[in-house]
Image (tube, grey):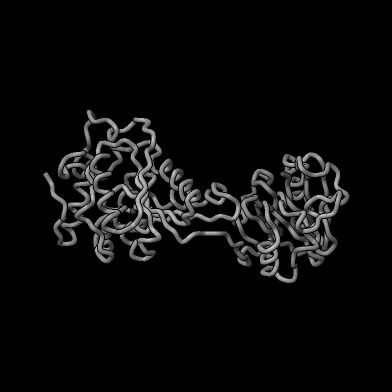
Amino acid sequence: MCSICGGTKWDAISTYIWEKSKDRGRDDHGREELAGAWIGNHRATPTTEVSHPIEKQPVGENPLIVFNGIISNDADLQINEGEADTSVLPRVLDFSSLEKFRNSIQNKLVGSYAIAVLFANGEIWLAANYKPIWIARDKNEFYFSSLASHFPPQMKPYRVRPYSVQSLTNPLIHFPIERTQSKKALVVCSAGLDSVTVASYICFTNGPENTTLLHFDYGCRATGREIEQIKKISQWLQCGLEIIKMPSFGGSSLLDSTADIAEGKTGAEYAHEWVPARNLLMLSHAVAFAEAKGYGHIYLGTNLEEAGAYPDNEEQFIIDFNDLLYGAVQNGIKINVEAPLGGLMKHEIIPFGMKYHTPYHLTWSCYRNGEKHCGKCGPCFMRKTAFERNGLKDPVEYE
């Protein structure tokens, strides 16, 4: 829509930011200072608004306000003819404290926004939902702008947390902006040991009535057995089940019945059977399904052991994926992806699962599609070893 920017001092860095941030606004420009601090706006006129509003940004007096986004309920907030939507902000927001400022945003504004507020004492507050604001520091001075690329190359900006308000100079002073998040949970479940452990844990802690297993049929060799077992598992756990057919792009021995499968320790310690972007595609589908069907949480069985062989099992991948979700779902909606086993090794997963009565006798871990587990492929080797380390007998049958 446009760019907002500012800082605690107008200097050479501020000049650089001011000029670079014009890339997001070509129609109008406004900048003002209070107590040596400044805020500014480069406006790109929304198609639905007047080209030259009667009041340009910054708006207000004390505080001054700049804004990036669209207030879609501006008519309800009694915007006057000829005003841009920004003009209503001094009239409807509460600036008596940072927390009350947050509350007024939650209660009053509908739409997208990145807001900066400059007070007569030079203090600056920032607020954003999914619209970006970036902050950088140089010695004792602080600066902000709409994109990281607006800062000088030597600076290392960081982003204001999506859906939050904070002080520019003290990021520890912040309040989250509430979003809607359903209690209902999806568990991405293959029917294997790890994901069924998670399914049992979530059914136990969240209730089976609030839990649905989401199984992806991506055409692997063991698809038949996986689907057969996942149906039994959902019945055992008394939770819902959804099966989604995904396209197969090839590129993996798991998708080619004629290819060799690595066995034993060799098959457990390296991703010989890597399926290109599998977890990324599954998670993307899961997020879309969750938003469409009203689920607020997505769980999966990625773990510390398999992170050694599979990049998309690493905890950091899940963290990074979560960091993108603010912009993957509708404004005001919150969905989390969580990996309860992310810090556990395979032999630690077994006792964890036993506490939640995991039906290990129904699980299917084998890469092959036989009547029994082959006992040779990487997953078979790992689960057998994990049970043995716990002094337990694996309840599934092996050839």
Residue at image point 50% right, 48% down: 292
Residue closer to the observer: 264 or 333: 333
Query: How many marks can you see?
Result: 0
Rendering coords of residue 224 (x, y %):
25, 39
Residue farthest toward the right in the current orientation of the protein? 54
Q: Tell me: 315 left or right of 197.
A: right
Residue at image point 42% right, 40% down: 281
Residue at image point 67% right, 66% down: 103
In this view, 114 is above or below 152: below
Quadrant, the C terminus: top left
Residue closer to the observer: 274 or 223: 223
Rendering coords of residue 67 (x, y %):
74, 53
Rendering coords of residue 15 (x, y %):
78, 47
Q: Do we see residue 158 in this rendering?
A: no
Q: Tell me: 240 left or right of 141.
A: left
Residue farthest toward the left in the current orientation of the protein? 399
Q: Tell me: 341 left or right of 316.
A: left
Question: Which image quadrant is residue 256 in?
Answer: top left
Residue farthest toward the bottom in the current orientation of the protein? 96
In this view, 75 is above or below 249: below
Rendering coords of residue 351 (x, y %):
24, 63
Q: Tell me: 33 left or right of 336.
A: right
Residue at image point 74% right, 50% down: 4
Question: Which image quadrant is residue 169 in?
Answer: bottom right
Quadrant, the N terminus: top right
Q: Do we see residue 235 in this rendering?
A: yes
